[in-house]
Amino acid sequence: MPGVDLNYFMRQASKLTEKLEQRKKELAEETVEGQAGDGRVKVVATGTGDVRSIKIAPDVLAAGDVEMMEDLIAAAVNSALTQARELSERELGKVSGGLKIPGITG
């Protein structure tokens, strides 16, 4: 195709990939917090979805209700992971201009 510089497009795609990979590294350092049970269980996760910490209030442990504790932990983890996914999609979308790039942005 005359007038189309494929090398230019390849360089632009490479730059975009580099920016996206850099932002992913930064997201691995950012954190979000999910909570359940009015904040009695808190989970901190990175922007890439790795769980960093889980805090459980002493009253939850003292209650001795294992099933409730399991439910609260699962709910807090799911909340944190949902927030991490939303943060990642939002931030990578800013870099890619909203383009969905399989394996990179979505």
Image (cartoon, grey):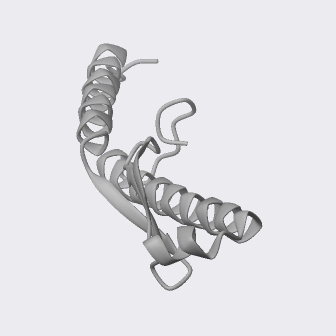
Q: Which residue is drawn at 76% across and 65% down?
A: 67
Q: Residue at x 53, y 44 (%)?
A: 100
In percent of width and height, residue 12 lies at 28, 27
Question: Quadrant of the image for the C terminus?
Answer: top right
Q: Nearer the viewer, residue 65 or 80?
A: 65
Closest to the observer: 53 or 66? Answer: 66
How far across and how far down the image is residue 31, in percent?
30, 54
Residue for point 31% across, 29% down:
21
Vertical relation: 92 (above or below) 15: below
Q: Quadrant of residue 13?
A: top left
In this rendering, position of residue 13 left or right of residue 83: left
Which quarter of the picture shows residue 91? bottom left
Tag count? 0
Q: Is residue 88 above or below residue 69?
A: above
Instruction: Residue at 30% x, 32% y: name it.
Output: 16
Toward the top, the furthest residue is 7
**Image quadrant assignment for residue 103:** top right
Looking at the image, is 22 positioned above or below residue 29? above
Q: Where is residue 97 in the image (x, y as percent from the top left)?
A: 36, 52
Given residues 96 and 25, the one toward you in this image is 25
- Name of the residue lying farthest toward the right: 67
Residue 34 drawn at (x, y percent): 46, 67
Q: Nearer the viewer, residue 81 or 14?
A: 81
- Above or below residue 23? Residue 1 is above
